[in-house]
């Protein structure tokens, strides 16, 4: 019998919405889609493999109220409740954790990237009992075994816990995981038909990850600090096959930091998808310097219909400052090759970069139009904790905004390092970039011809209308309208 056999664990994913230092503009954010929590599905898979009985309550996707969630928890009767935490949504999640703890005094275990950054600050909250501070594959079964069997918590690597006097202990990080050994996300615990992205076309839809970490060092991203480890093609396609055959999944979004870092691996994944005749369409994120025609052809032949490229800026100096190690020429070349291979292109851009001016934002908007991308997302720069950009902010201001936010709940506007433009200007220009990109007759005609379903049409019209009429996240509701004049 498995050592944790019968131990009941409930995983709860509370509802969430925009926060103050939100990179997305509100209209876009609200229409982004409903995704399953891949992090919690991984945790569920790990717990089940260790013998636990798990329920996953996705209050966000199912629109459950607090009362309904508590009722489900009572009916299940867990010994532990788990939540995933992000630094951004810390207080939205905490509001639910506190309210649930008032109803059910059951030990709370948390995890997520946030815990690798702020474990002590998080465990200072009385409602949080325990945390996994890194990947859960090794640490969580050991933690559970120690909790259930009365073992020594200090011997478990990669966790944080409280001593009798409430002092927080953070144990040394766990050893890096062999990613092929990780149990698959427990998608059988959710209703896979309720998820979608704002541009997905088929149901069932899910998100997927085939690697962890990233070997690059862009200054705005914390993933570059994590060792890059990629799963083998066979392991990836085994999970894909399960998605198709067991969960009726027809569309997937690969959330790898950069899916094509190892090109031969991707070519083999694609060949295996075809060999097993998996009827799926999918999208992936990558960098322009990790793409060749051979990879594009293989991806297209295996069902890839969209690639998300991190383009960030149309200004060369800004790209250098961001340590992006890409060039405008590469963008032009790779976006055009991608389209020629029959794959739609999606560009991520950032507004409010170091040394940003109105002139550099115009260059970014011009580049987005010139590349003639199928989709573009313009995000307001937000210096995230554990990034080089955040270190720049710390030096510039002498303030540790995120730590203060977590410790005290202070909810201030976080400045952008080396950027003289005000938040209102950045908001206005971000919205303007959207309007400029999406409200072109040529773009509208193409978008309409691409629509595959009535549902997609309604979603697009709704977003377009909201964007045009007002962006309630902005204090400047008419921001950017001059572009239509
Ligand atoms: C897929 C994804 C999404 C998807 C699905 C959500 C999800 N987390 O699965 C969507 C699009 C919905 C999403 C939304 C958001 N995301 Co997101 N997302 C990711 C992404 C790309 C992959 C997550 C993943 O599955 N990784 C693979 C798994 C195996 O790793 P993991 O998530 O770290 O989980 C492991 C451990 O952390 C731990 N663990 C995680 N949770 C828990 C819980 C318990 C109880 C335990 C014991 C352990 C544990 O065990 C897991 C297995 O080893 C990551 C970046 C990345 N590459 O990791 C960002 C990331 C997690 N997201 C991030 C953010 C900011 C958000 C949003 C706040 C964005 C927004 N403004 O709305 C929301 C928050 C949603 C929410 N309520 O959690 C940040 C978090 C940064 C931070 N400091 O907290 C990341 C790191 C991206 C980044 N670099 O900025 N996201
Ligand atoms: S932005 Fe992409 S390429 Fe750059 S460090 Fe992050 S994950 Fe890696």
Image (cartoon, helix red, strand yellow):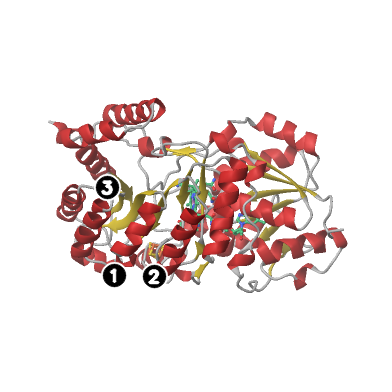
Mark 3, secondary structure of its residue: helix
Q: Is residue 387 left or right of residue 232?
A: left
Residue at 16% x, 50% y is 370
Nearest the camera: 276 or 131?
Answer: 276
Q: Earlier in the sequence, mark 1 or mark 3?
A: 1
Nearest the camera: 218 or 311?
Answer: 311
Q: Which residue is mark 2?
A: 216
Q: Which mark is residue 466?
A: none
Q: Quadrant of residue 14?
A: top right
Calculate the distance from the C-alpha at mark 2 to the C-alpha at mark 3: 27 Å
Residue at 22% x, 41% y is 437
Quadrant of the image for the N terminus? Answer: bottom right
Q: Quadrant of residue 110?
A: bottom right
Are there few (<14), some (14-19), or many (20+) residues within 10 Å of tag 3?
many
Q: Which residue is mark 1?
A: 325
Q: Is residue 114 left or right of residue 141?
A: left
Disc 2 Cβ-to-ligand 2 distance below 8 Å: yes
Residue at 51% x, 67% y is 230
Q: Is residue 20 above or below residue 395?
A: above
Mark 2, secondary structure of its residue: loop
Tell me if label 2 and label 1 are in contact, CB under 8 Å: yes
Are there few (<14), some (14-19), or many (20+) residues within 10 Å of tag 1?
some
Calculate the distance from the C-alpha at mark 2 to the C-alpha at mark 1: 9 Å
The image shows residue 418 at horizontal and vertical percentages of: 28, 62
Q: Nearer the viewer, mark 2 or mark 3?
A: 2
Can residue 85 be seen?
A: no
Calculate the distance from the C-alpha at mark 1 to the C-alpha at mark 3: 24 Å
Q: Is residue 362 above or below residue 174?
A: above
Q: Which residue is mark 3?
A: 426
The image shows residue 299 at horizontal and vertical percentages of: 38, 56
Tell me if label 1 and label 3 are in contact, CB under 8 Å: no
The image shows residue 91 at horizontal and vertical percentages of: 56, 45
């Amino acid at each position: 019998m498995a050592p944790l056999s019968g131990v009941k664990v409930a995983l709860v994913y509370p509802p969430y919405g925009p926060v103050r230092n939100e990179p997305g503009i509100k209209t876009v954010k609200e229409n982004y889609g409903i995704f399953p929590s891949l992090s919690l599905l991984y945790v569920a898979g790990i717990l089940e493999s260790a013998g636990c009985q798990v329920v996953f309550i996705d209050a966000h996707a199912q629109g459950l109220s607090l009362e309904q969630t508590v009722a489900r928890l009572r009916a299940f009767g867990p010994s532990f409740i788990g939540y995933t935490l992000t630094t951004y949504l810390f207080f939205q999640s905490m509001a639910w954790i506190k309210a649930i703890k008032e109803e059910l005094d059951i030990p709370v275990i948390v995890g997520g990237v946030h815990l690798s950054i702020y474990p002590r600050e998080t465990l200072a909250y009385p409602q949080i009992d325990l945390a996994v501070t890194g990947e859960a594959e090794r640490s969580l079964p050991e933690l559970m075994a120690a909790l259930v069997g009365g073992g020594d918590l200090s011997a478990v690597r990669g966790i944080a816990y409280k001593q009798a006097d409430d002092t927080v202990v953070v144990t040394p990080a766990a050893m890096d995981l062999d990613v092929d050994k990780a149990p698959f996300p427990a998608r059988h615990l959710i209703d896979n038909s309720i998820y979608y992205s704002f541009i997905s076309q088929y149901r069932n839809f899910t998100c997927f990850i085939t690697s962890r970490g990233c070997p690059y060092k862009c200054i705005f991203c914390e993933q570059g600090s994590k060792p890059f480890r990629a799963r083998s093609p066979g392991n990836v396609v085994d999970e894909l096959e399960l998605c198709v055959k067991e969960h009726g999944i027809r569309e997937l979004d690969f959330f790898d930091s950069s899916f094509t870092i190892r090109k031969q691996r991707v070519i083999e994944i694609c060949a295996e998808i075809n060999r097993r005749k998996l009827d799926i369409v999918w999208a992936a994120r990558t960098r322009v310097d990790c793409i060749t025609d051979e990879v594009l052809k293989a991806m297209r032949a295996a069902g890839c219909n969209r690639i998300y490229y991190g383009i960030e800026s149309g200004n060369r100096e800004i790209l250098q400052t961001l340590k992006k190690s890409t060039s405008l020429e590469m963008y032009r070349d790779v976006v055009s090759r991608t389209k020629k291979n029959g794959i739609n292109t999606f560009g991520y851009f950032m507004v409010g970069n170091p040394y940003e001016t109105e002139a550099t934002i115009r260059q970014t908007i011009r580049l987005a139009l010139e590349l003639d991308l199928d989709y573009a997302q313009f995000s307001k720069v937000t210096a995230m904790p554990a990034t080089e950009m955040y270190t720049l902010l710390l030096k510039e201001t002498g303030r540790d905004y995120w730590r203060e936010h977590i410790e005290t709940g202070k909810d201030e506007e976080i400045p952008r390092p080396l950027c003289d433009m005000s938040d209102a200007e950045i908001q206005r220009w971000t919205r303007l970039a959207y309007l400029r990109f999406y409200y072109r007759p040529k773009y509208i005609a193409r978008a309409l011809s691409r629509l595959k379903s009535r549902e997609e049409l309604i979603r697009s019209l709704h977003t377009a209308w909201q964007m045009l009429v007002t962006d309630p996240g902005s204090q400047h509701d008419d921001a950017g309208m001059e572009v239509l004049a």
